[in-house]
Image (tube, rainbow, N blue to C red):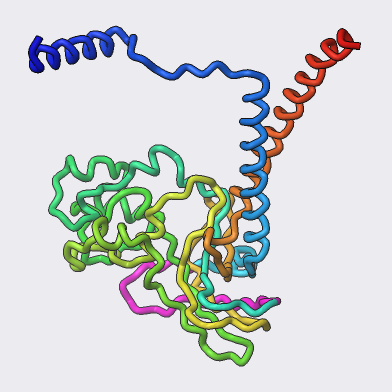
């Protein structure tokens, strides 16, 4: 038999075995000892990772002040006149020195950004700065035109009701628009930068302005990009800015342009200063999850160990 014929025969055999699902495979049969070893390894890994994450999380410094109950006046702009918004002033205490970078967050509660209709209510084509047709913005329903957007927020009068809202959709329409000015204990202004707070992939490929004369907001603003990344849980923090200098302990003042109402969804809002580590910001959920899985695996491990001990007892009794 020639080499070509042998190769064809081998190929035919392989295809037949693949189609009939009779290919050679490793089919391990778990034993009591191997199961004990597997769960011992899993419980050790989960518990070690959980403890490390919890320890690192507890080292993160965090200072939060809720202000929706203290800033009762909401700014509702209703004209194109340049009227300065009412400013709400709140003081809070930073108990320990925070090394740079210090991250500035706003925290919202009871806001369900994970609702299916809310998540899909945007136009990817439009956000990338391309010309759009109705089919491109149809997913933005119920906010497709500026007449729809005006039901939710203020829109400059030069933008016509019959034009497509740019950007359209529920996510953009609910954009968080409170602003903050931070003053240190000596009443000096603390600079808060809005650069390098969005994902690099978002900045490079996903958002581009079309024409600011037809847009109601700047889609290349990194705070807008952060908002457009919907949160998985109803209580969440989103990055508003970063402070690239040390924040010493002391009493600080934050001046808030209180523009964002939360009464409609029975929510709360807070201003947060926080440091970070290699695992990100302060979030104990992942560490606790690892600990819970480690404990579950350890309990299962004890069950199998107990079963092995009971199996060995009759053997020992027979030998005696």
Q: Position of residue 210 (x, y in %)?
A: 17, 62
Q: Is residue 86 visible?
A: no
Query: Would you place residue 183 above or below residue 9 in this image?
Result: below
Residue 79 part of the magenta-drawn span: yes
In depth, the one of 301 and 26 nearer the eye is 26
Q: Position of residue 214 (x, y in %)?
A: 19, 63
Question: Magenta segment, which residues?
Answer: 75-95
> Of helix, strand and loop, which mostly describes the magenta segment?
loop
Name which residue lies at 55% across and 66% down.
276
- The quadrant the C terminus occupies is top right
- The quadrant the N terminus occupies is top left
Query: Would you place residue 269 above or below residue 179 in this image?
Result: above
In depth, the one of 149 and 96 nearer the eye is 96
In depth, the one of 91 and 272 nearer the eye is 272
Q: Position of residue 202 (x, y in %)?
A: 31, 58
Name which residue lies at 55% across and 60% down.
107
The part of the image, by quadrant, that contains residue 42 is top right
Query: Would you place residue 99 above or below residue 285 in this image?
Result: below
On the picture, is 220 further left or further right than 252? Answer: left
Name which residue lies at 56% across and 84% down.
183
On the picture, is 170 further left or further right than 318? Answer: left
The part of the image, by quadrant, that contains residue 297 is top right
Residue 131 part of the magenta-drawn span: no
Q: Is residue 306 visible?
A: yes
Q: Farthest residue in the front direction?
A: 1
Q: Farthest residue in the right direction?
A: 320
Query: Would you place residue 7 above or below residue 118 in this image?
Result: above
In depth, the one of 109 and 258 nearer the eye is 109
Name which residue lies at 26% across and 59% down.
207
């Amino acid at each position: 038999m020639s080499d070509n014929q042998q190769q064809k025969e081998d190929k035919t055999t392989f295809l037949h075995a693949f189609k009939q699902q009779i290919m050679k495979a490793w089919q391990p049969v778990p034993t009591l000892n191997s199961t004990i070893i597997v769960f011992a390894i899993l419980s050790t890994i989960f518990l070690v990772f959980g403890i490390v994450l919890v320890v690192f999380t507890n080292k993160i410094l965090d200072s939060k002040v809720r202000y929706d109950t203290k800033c009762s006046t909401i700014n509702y702009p209703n004209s194109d006149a340049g009227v300065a918004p009412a400013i709400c002033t709140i003081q809070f205490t930073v108990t320990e020195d925070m090394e740079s970078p210090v991250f500035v967050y706003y925290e919202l509660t009871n806001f369900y950004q994970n609702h299916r209709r809310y998540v899909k209510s945007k136009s990817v084509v439009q956000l990338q700065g391309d010309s759009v047709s109705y089919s491109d913005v149809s997913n933005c329903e119920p906010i497709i035109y500026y007449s729809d957007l005006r039901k939710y927020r203020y829109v400059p009068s030069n933008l016509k009701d019959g034009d497509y809202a740019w950007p359209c959709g529920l996510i953009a329409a609910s954009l968080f628009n409170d602003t903050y000015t931070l003053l240190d204990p000596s009443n000096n202004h603390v600079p808060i930068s809005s650069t390098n707070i969005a994902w690099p992939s978002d900045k490079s490929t996903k958002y581009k302005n079309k024409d600011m004369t037809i847009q109601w907001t700047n889609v290349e603003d990194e705070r807008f990009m952060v908002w457009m990344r919907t949160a998985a849980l109803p209580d969440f923090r989103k990055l508003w800015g970063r402070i690239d200098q040390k924040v010493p302990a002391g009493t600080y003042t934050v001046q808030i342009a209180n523009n964002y109402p939360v009464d409609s969804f029975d929510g709360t809002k807070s201003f947060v200063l926080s440091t970070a580590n290699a695992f990100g910001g302060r979030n104990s959920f992942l560490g606790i999850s690892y600990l819970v899985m480690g404990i579950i695996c350890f309990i299962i491990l004890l069950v199998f160990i107990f079963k092995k001990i009971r199996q060995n007892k009759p053997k020992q009794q027979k030998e005696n």
